[in-house]
Amino acid sequence: MTIDTIAPAVPGVPDLTAASDTGTSNTDNNTTDNTPTFTGTGPANTIIDLMANNTVFGTTTSDGTGKWTATATALPNGTFLFSARSRDAAGNTSALSPGLNVTITKSPPPPPPLTITSYTLVNADTGKDSAC
C-alpha cells in the first residue's frame, strides 16, 4: 500500500476576468461585482481553492491542462488579496499562490449631478391679493 503525502504544485496567480473587472479599464482589478470570477493555471485535474485573504471563497477543478475558472461567493466591499491553492485526491494541499489585490465596490459611483437648463412656473403667485 502506498500513502500519498506529497502536496501538489502551487497554482499560478489568479487573474480577474475582464467581464468581472468593471473598473476604469478591464485590467485595473477594480470591480463592482461582489461575486467576481477568476481564471488561472495549476496542476492538471486537481481541486483548486480560490482564497480571499486566506479564506476559501470558491472551489473548482482544473482541467486536463491545468486551466481553471472559479467564481467567488459574495464578498463585502473592500480590498482583498486573492490567491489559489491546489488539493489532490489524497487531501494534500499546496502552498498558496502569489496573490492579486482586487478592490470591490458593490455600488457603482453615483451619476453626475442633474443640471437644469430651463423651467416653467406653474400656479405662480402674481403678488396680488385675491378678493373673497
Image (spheres, helix red, strand yellow):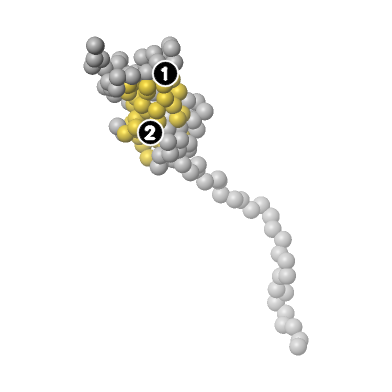
- Residue shown at 50% from the left, 42% from the top: 108
Residue 110 in view here: yes
Q: Which corner quadrant of the image does residue 111 belong to?
A: top right
For the C terminus, give its image quadrant. bottom right
**Category of crowding for the residue at label 2, using alpha-carbon neighbours closer than 10 angstroms: few (below 14), some (14–19), many (at least 20):** some
**Who is closer to the viewer here, 44 or 108?**
44
Task: Describe the element under mark 1 as helix, strand or loop.
Answer: loop
The quarter in which the N terminus is drawn is top left
Tag 2 residue: 57
User: Disc 2 residue type?
Assistant: Phe
Seen as rendered, the residue at the extreme right is 131
First in sequence, mark 1 or 2: give its number: 2
Residue in view at x 71 percent, y 70 percent: 124
Three-letter code, disc 1 = Ser
Label placed on residue 62: 1
Q: In the picture provided, is 11 more to the left or to the right than 37?
A: left
Q: Is residue 105 above or below residue 130?
A: above
**The image quarter in which residue 59 lies:** top left
The answer to whether the residue labelled 1 contacts the one labelled 2, judged by CB atoms less than 8 Å apart, is no
SS for tag 2? strand
- Residue 47's place in the image compared with 122, above or below, is above
Tell me where residue 8 sits by quadrant.
top left
